[in-house]
Amino acid sequence: ETGVTQSPTHLIKTRGQQVTLRCSSQSGHNTVSWYQQALGQGPQFIFQYYREEENGRGNFPPRFSGLQFPNYSSELNVNALELDDSALYLCASSSSGGVYYGYTFGSGTRLTVV
Amino acid sequence: AQKITQTQPGMFVQEKEAVTLDCTYDTSDPSYGLFWYKQPSSGEMIFLIYQGSYDQQNATEGRYSLNFQKARKSANLVISASQLGDSAMYFCAMREVSGGSNYKLTFGKGTLLTVNP
């Protein structure tokens, strides 16, 4: 059973550029969530995808968008990058149904915007 | 208002001793779940322990136990017999079940635990 894989691990972008981060969910998991973790803070929920549809969103502007594919992998896209977008981006997968939702996190993508 | 409060930015403990990391939460939802995660410097969030709001017993997982006091809205993590490898950031998180939206974890700001030899 593989865990959650994120790519790339590190990325440096220039302000105003666009970036795509990728996530492969754990086998058997059909739900993917994305979190932004600024330095010294706890992760903040960006959005969640279930069966290729966004079914929840945090307080992030529309320039943060995503996709989920039929194999449940996912992408996070950020347009018009700002310096404050510099953070660790974490992907978490889970399976729907049941009281306990086990969230498995990847190691994250560390994005630096200069 | 903060939903998850971790009041200890940093904690120190001697190897082999026990340590308690504090977490209080705020919700009006009767059904919720509480999680503790460990985040080493590599960045990955490692699941440690889970407590459901309706669980009668405090959760335990090996050296980790959760001291769940529902009336006080607290969910403190107890690590027994600390090891050097326990040095990391620890996050308390809550999942609220509301209107069928079984999603999103709300995290606290974390506690940096340092285990001294």
Image (tube, coloured by chain):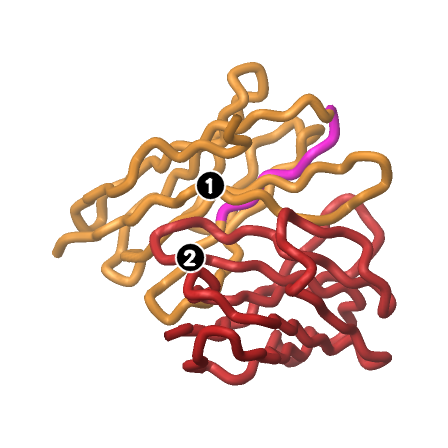
Chain colours: A red, B orange
User: Looking at the image, is A30 positioned above or below residue A38?
Assistant: below
Residue at the image point whose x is 57% and y is 25% from the top: B26
**Dot in front, 1 or 2:** 2
Tell whether position B50 is magenta: no
| Front in this rendered view, residue B17 or A92 | A92
Residue that appears at 46% across and 41% down: B108
Q: Is residue B110 visible?
A: yes
In the foreground, B39 or B51 = B39
Relative side of B74 to B79, left or right: right
Residue A112: image quadrant is bottom left
The disc at residue A38 is: 2
Crowd rating for badge 1 (residues with CA inside 10 Å; few <14, some 14–19, many 20+)? many
Position in image of residue B85 (x %, y %): 29, 62
Are the residues under marks 1 and 2 on the same chain? Answer: no
Front residue of A5/A114: it is: A114
Label 1: which residue? B108
Query: x, y (%) of residue A17?
Result: 53, 79
The amino acid sitting under disc 1 is Gly
Q: Quadrant of residue A92?
A: bottom right
Residue B8 image offset from top left, x and y in percent = 30, 35
**Against B80, is B57 above or below?**
above
Mark 2 surroundings within 10 Å by alpha-carbon count, few (fewer than 14), some (14 through 19), many (20 or more):
some
Q: Chain of mark 2?
A: A
Which secondary structure dominates the residues rendered in magenta? strand
Q: Which one is nearer the viewer's eye here, B2 or A102?
A: B2
In this orientation, does residue A10 appear? no
Q: Residue at x 20, y 44 (%)?
A: B13
Spatial CA distance of label 1 from label 2 is: 13 Å
Looking at the rendering, the stretch of residues picked out in magenta corresponds to B30-36
